Image: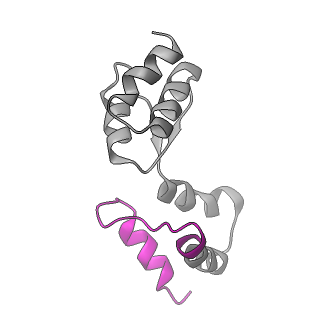
Amino acid sequence: MAAPASFVSFAAELDDDEAMTTALALHRSMIVATDDRKATRLCASLTSALPVQTTAAMIESWPDARQIPHESLRQVLPAVRERARFAPGRHDPLHAWWHAVLHSEE
């Protein structure tokens, strides 16, 4: 199936932005970056499951990948919450990690 056909198929289940992101990732063999649960389920259901990366997972991997000090991470999380209006939901696997970093005294 071509990317435009995938987009149309995905748009029946997702909003246009998520459908386009998923179609492009599928046809370019890329990772989908999304926090949308419907999109995550759709990606997992595809014949060749499409990898998904969440915002929380990207932020959680950032300090190790770039040797970012813990204190800097503690300053970044509130900024992400306030400026990007993002915080992992209570069902997000990294919810506890996020709050542990915010409330740590390191």
Q: Position of residue 73 (x, y in %)?
A: 61, 74
What residue sits 48% from the left and 59% below the top?
A: 56
What residue sits 54% from the left and 28% below the top?
A: 25
Q: Which residues are magenta?
A: 80-106
- Tell how many labels: 0
Image quadrant for the N terminus? top left
| Image quadrant assignment for residue 8 | top left
Q: Position of residue 74 (x, y in %)?
A: 58, 79
What residue sits 45% from the left and 68% below the top?
A: 87
Q: Position of residue 79 (x, y in %)?
A: 61, 75
Q: Is residue 65 left or right of residue 47?
A: right
The image shows residue 102, relative to residue 89, as above or below, that is below
- In this orientation, which residue lies closer to the viewer: 13 or 104? 13
Image quadrant for the C terminus? bottom right
- What is the residue that sits farthest to the top in this orientation? 1
- What is the residue that sits farthest to the bottom in this orientation? 105
The image shows residue 104, relative to residue 4, as above or below, that is below
Q: Is residue 103 magenta?
A: yes
- In this orientation, which residue lies closer to the viewer: 41 or 67? 41
| Image quadrant assignment for residue 95 | bottom left
Q: Is residue 82 magenta?
A: yes
**Is there any visible trace of residue 49 in the rendered image?**
no
Q: Is residue 19 left or right of residue 47?
A: right
Q: Position of residue 13 (x, y in %)?
A: 32, 33
**Is there any visible trace of residue 21 in the rendered image?**
yes
